[in-house]
Image (cartoon, helix red, strand yellow):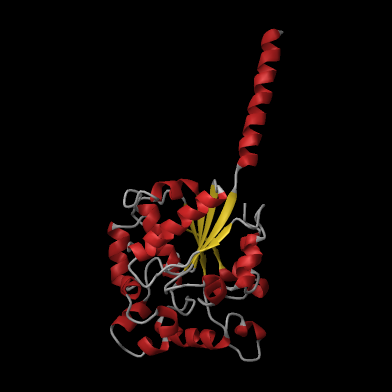
């Protein structure tokens, strides 16, 4: 009888201990921008509606950080991955974060993959990796883009895509197709034939660009930007978001979903729209803050 009572007591204690540990978890979200040197990514890159709607899904919406780093550099540079590691470490410490959700866009996914793939490169990386629950990579440039090759080669894209790429920066050189193939084969995890990433890395894939002037959906994220992306689609595969082929976006980790399967009205996400509150993307991410 005593054994039964003791077993019941230990069982209750185990349940209490488990629920207490779970209740003690502090979940936070970090927004990691793409190519470019950002000083106010909250306003300029993501915009408040996107950030505020997504963080509203947290138990404590104040547990968020919007990264501002110099992603015109190579992914491993101290101004890129080093800056990201510093801001993530400060956020984790200041908010006592135990579970970290990362939302990246475009080349931000490559910078995060560098950290996930090279834990011994920087003493701050292991603690960050340990806290990460997953990386939700919005339109990641995991296999690069032919447009980066075009910019570096100095043709018309250098001027027409300067607003998106930042001209001939090291980050643009890095995103050339052949260069990313080399990095994926030697320095980064998560692509075919390579070791898996230590934490879930899942992509949201943009498949098309729509710019019909009579359709209000064409204006989400900025009509001029979407029009530019529709133009560059001529140099990409039939499945692209105007900047990246779907194959590049799908090259690392796993595909969470392709735009039309979850967006309102089965709308596609252009590369510009995949960082904005367009067609319910913010709501999908908000509902996943757990």
Q: Please, is residue 55 above or below residue 141 in the view?
A: above
Task: Tell me which corner region of the image, top left, top right, bottom left or bottom right, holds residue 169.
Answer: bottom left
* Residue at 32% across, 64% down: 77
Question: What residue lies at 49% left-to-right and 64% top-to-bottom?
Answer: 67
Of residue 39 and residue 61, the one placed in the foreground of this image is 39
Point out the residue furthest to the front here: 94
Residue 165 point in image, percent of width and height: 40, 79
Residue 181, image x, y percentages: 31, 65
Farthest residue, direction top: 1
Can residue 251 be seen at all in this image of the molecule? no
Residue 289 in percent (x, y) is at 62, 55
In this rendered view, identify the residue nearer to me: 196 or 173.
173
How many numbered badges does the structure rendering display? 0
Q: Is residue 253 above or below residue 168?
A: above
Point out the image quarter for the N terminus: top right
Q: In this rendering, would 120 be left or right of 271?
A: left
**In terms of image quadrants, where is residue 167?**
bottom left
């Amino acid at each position: 009888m005593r054994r039964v009572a003791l077993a019941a007591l230990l069982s209750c204690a185990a349940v209490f201990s488990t629920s207490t540990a779970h209740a003690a978890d502090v979940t936070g979200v970090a927004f990691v921008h793409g190519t470019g040197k950002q000083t106010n990514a909250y306003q300029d890159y993501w915009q408040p509606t996107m950030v505020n709607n997504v963080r509203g899904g947290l138990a404590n919406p104040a547990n968020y950080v919007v990264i501002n780093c110099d992603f015109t550099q190579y992914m491993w540079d101290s101004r890129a991955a080093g800056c990201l590691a510093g801001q993530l470490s400060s956020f984790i410490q200041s908010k006592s974060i135990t579970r970290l959700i990362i939302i990246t866009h475009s080349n931000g996914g490559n910078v995060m993959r560098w950290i996930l793939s090279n834990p011994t490169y920087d003493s701050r990386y292991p603690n960050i990796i340990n806290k990460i629950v997953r990386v939700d990579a919005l339109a990641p440039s995991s296999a690069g883009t032919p447009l980066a090759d075009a910019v570096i080669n100095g043709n018309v894209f250098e001027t027409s895509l300067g607003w998106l790429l930042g001209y001939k920066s090291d980050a643009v050189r890095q995103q050339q197709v052949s260069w990313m193939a080399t990095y994926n084969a030697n320095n980064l995890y998560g692509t075919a034939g390579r070791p898996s990433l230590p934490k879930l890395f899942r992509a949201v894939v943009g498949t098309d660009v729509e710019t019909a002037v009579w359709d209000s959906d064409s204006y989400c994220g900025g009509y001029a930007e979407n029009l530019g992306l529709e133009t560059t689609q001529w140099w990409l595969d039939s499945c692209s978001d105007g900047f990246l082929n779907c194959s590049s976006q799908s090259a690392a980790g796993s595909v969470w979903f392709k735009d039309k399967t979850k967006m309102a009205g089965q709308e596609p996400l252009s590369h510009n729209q995949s960082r904005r509150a367009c067609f319910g993307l913010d709501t999908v991410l908000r509902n996943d803050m757990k």
